[in-house]
Image (cartoon, rainbow, N blue to C red):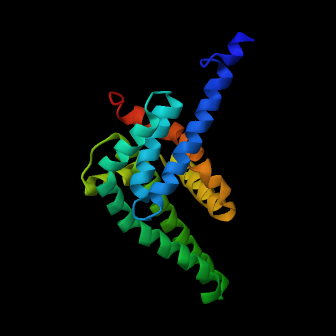
Amino acid sequence: MGNLFNPDAFLWRWCSRILDMMILSTLWLLCSLPVVTVGAASTALYDAAVHGVRRDEAGTCARFFRTFRRELKPGCLAVLLWGPVIAALVWCGTIIGTAVQEPVPVLAATTVLVLALFFALGTVAWMFPLLSRFTFSFGALNRTAGQFLIVHLPSSVLLVVLLAGCAWACFRFLFPVFFLPCAGTLLASFPVERAFARHLPSQN
């Protein structure tokens, strides 16, 4: 019975992790409200989730804000570059079925659109974890994210599906936004960290 009230007990450790996930998801939401800052917020979320929740390191919230401030400029630049691209591709997807009536053109246009959207989302999915861990110029960040997208194609497919699924659930039902951003980030961290370990084994 004494172990039940021990702060190091299994139950309390998991309760603490769940609370951290909810706090980080809420911080991500609040810091993303200006929209242009969603890149910096996503970078901070990945860094804090991996170190604070997955690795159980202290100072989770402090780490979030520290990374957010540090990566604010490149994160905003990434959103300004890729945000309009992704928005335009999604918009094209909503009108392509009504704009083109012939089956063959529809299939061809849909294939091109899906590939382009996959490339954009896949690049973004790798970009913010890379930014949270390493220092790049903006051009090198985009180039490296594109390289990871291609070299780790199966992981990239998983990351895109996870990103799209989390975004759909948060927009469709709203309440998942208070826990799903961090939960999805933690799931994404497994293939991402495995890729980091493969290419840069000396980095932590």
| Residue at x-position 61% and y-position 25% | 13
Up the image or down, 65 lies above or below 17; here it is below
Q: Is residue 155 left or right of residue 179?
A: left
Up the image or down, 193 lies above or below 78; here it is above
Q: At which x and y percent is residue 44? A: 42, 46
Q: Residue furthest right?
A: 1
Q: Residue furthest left?
A: 137
| Residue at x-position 64% and y-position 87% | 98
Q: At which x and y percent is residue 186? A: 55, 40
Quadrant where the N terminus sits is top right
| Residue at x-position 64% and y-position 82% | 97
Q: Choose between 18 and 50: the one closer to the eye.
A: 18
- How many marks can you see? 0
Q: Determine which quarter of the picture holds residue 196.
A: top left
Q: Choose between 161 and 104: the one closer to the eye.
A: 161
Q: Can residue 177 be spotted in the picture? A: yes
Q: Choose between 96 and 178: the one closer to the eye.
A: 178
Q: At which x and y percent is residue 149? A: 44, 51
Q: Is residue 46 left or right of residue 77?
A: right
Quadrant where the C terminus sits is top left
| Residue at x-position 53% and y-position 37% | 190
